[in-house]
Image (tube, helix red, strand yellow):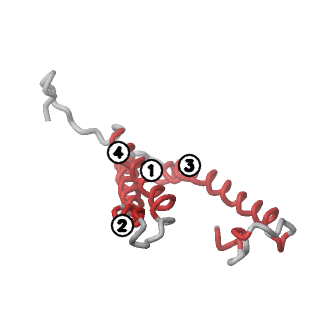
Amino acid sequence: MADPVTGESQAFALNQRIPELDGLRGFAILLVLFFHCLSLPIAELRPNPLAYVKYATRLTWTGVDLFFVLSGFLIGGILVDARDSPRYFPVFYFRRACRILPAYIAYLLLILVSYRYFLPSHGGPSTIAEFEPTMPWLSYC
């Protein structure tokens, strides 16, 4: 495809960042947040005008699918760009681990602290019903 101003050819480079896709992933996240925070809590009683809002937004959960499809496309582009690298898989998995493991470890620590300080059976206050143990804490890992 030629640039209308310069007339030069614009070849698509796989290693080029596409900000529009980042914006689309952000939109997918907003769809999921909207579904969980606004659409799910609305009662479906028909005289309630908000029931029509819930009906109109019932497919916002598909933001999860959109997010994962775009993430797969972007990660696939990273893999295609690095396919000639001598340490192809070790470098890829090391970078993924450095990106994912800190958030996962922080999540596990949050669960452990919550169980220790907020559960009545573990010495915490007994007024927080949301932290009642329904499953063993290892199931959250």
Distance (Cα) linking label 2 and label 1: 47 Å
Q: Which mark is residue 21?
A: 4
Q: Position of residue 95 (x, y in %)?
A: 53, 48
Distance (Cα) linking label 3 and label 2: 37 Å
- Residue found 34% across the figure and 62% down from its top: 56
Distance (Cα) linking label 4 and label 3: 19 Å
Q: In the image as oriented, which residue stretches furthest toward the top? A: 6
Amino acid, disc 2: Tyr
Q: Quick one: 78 or 85, which is closer to the camera? A: 78
Nearer the observer: mark 2 or 1; the answer is: 2
Q: Which residue is mark 3?
A: 99
- Residue found 51% across the figure and 54% down from its top: 93
- Looking at the image, tell me whether mark 4 or mark 2 is earlier in sequence order: 4
Q: Which mark is residue 88?
A: 1
Q: Residues within 10 Å of mark 3 (few under 14, many from 20)?
A: few
Distance (Cα) linking label 4 and label 2: 28 Å
- Looking at the image, tell me whether mark 1 or mark 4 is earlier in sequence order: 4
SS label for mark 2? helix
**CB contact under 8 Å: marks 1 and 4:** no
SS label for mark 1? helix
Q: Which mark is residue 55?
A: 2
Nearer the observer: mark 4 or 2; the answer is: 2
Above or below residue 43? Residue 81 is above
**CB contact under 8 Å: marks 2 and 1:** no
Q: Residues within 10 Å of mark 4 (few under 14, many from 20)?
A: some
